[in-house]
Image: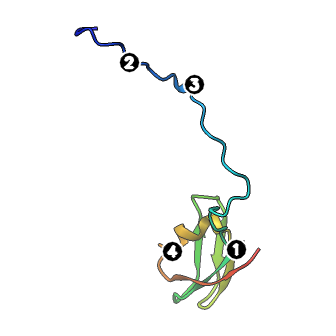
Amino acid sequence: MCCGAKPTQRLNPARTILPRTQAGSSSAAPSAPASVVFEYTGATGLTVVSPVTGKRYRFDAPGAQLTVDPRDHNMLLYVPNLRPARFTGR
């Protein structure tokens, strides 16, 4: 205290109580597709190993399509000669 003002109350993060969220609220985020199919458009074959899931995807020839883990979707978008072909539901 330097100027005679009342000390400010400090919050203890361990004791802070947050309000509960409503279960089943309508503001829930949309679910991701259960799987995504990627198509290879290159000239030969291609093998991709995902750093996200560790899965190995082997596209043997041009036009080859594989169902991939949805967690690998964003990473595979950056691989040359691969494109998403379609999404499948749960």
Work out which quarter of the rendered image holds the C terminus and state it: bottom right
Indicate the quadrant where residue 4 lies.
Answer: top left
* Label 3 element class: helix
Binning the other alpha carbons within 10 Å of mark 1 as few (below 14), some (14 to 19) or many (20 upward) gives: some
* Label 4 element class: loop
- Residue denoted by label 3: 14
Kind of residue indicated by mark 3: Ala
Indicate the quadrant where residue 88 lies.
Answer: bottom right
Q: Disc number at residue 77?
A: 4
The image shows residue 55 at horizontal and vertical percentages of 67, 63
First along the sequence among labels 1 and 2: 2
Check if mark 4's residue and mark 1's residue have beta carbons within 8 Å.
Answer: no
Kind of residue indicated by mark 4: Leu
The image shows residue 15 at horizontal and vertical percentages of 58, 24
Binning the other alpha carbons within 10 Å of mark 3 as few (below 14), some (14 to 19) or many (20 upward) gives: few
Residue name at image x 62 percent, y 62 percent: 27
Frontmost residue, 80 versus 37: 37
The image shows residue 83 at horizontal and vertical percentages of 54, 83
- Residue denoted by label 1: 35
First along the sequence among labels 1 and 3: 3
First along the sequence among labels 2 and 4: 2
* Labels 2, 4: front one: 2
Check if mark 1's residue and mark 2's residue have beta carbons within 8 Å.
Answer: no
Residue name at image x 60 percent, y 37 percent: 18
* Label 1 element class: strand
Look at the picture and state if 50 lies above or below 17: below
- Residue denoted by label 2: 8
Residue name at image x 73 percent, y 58 percent: 24
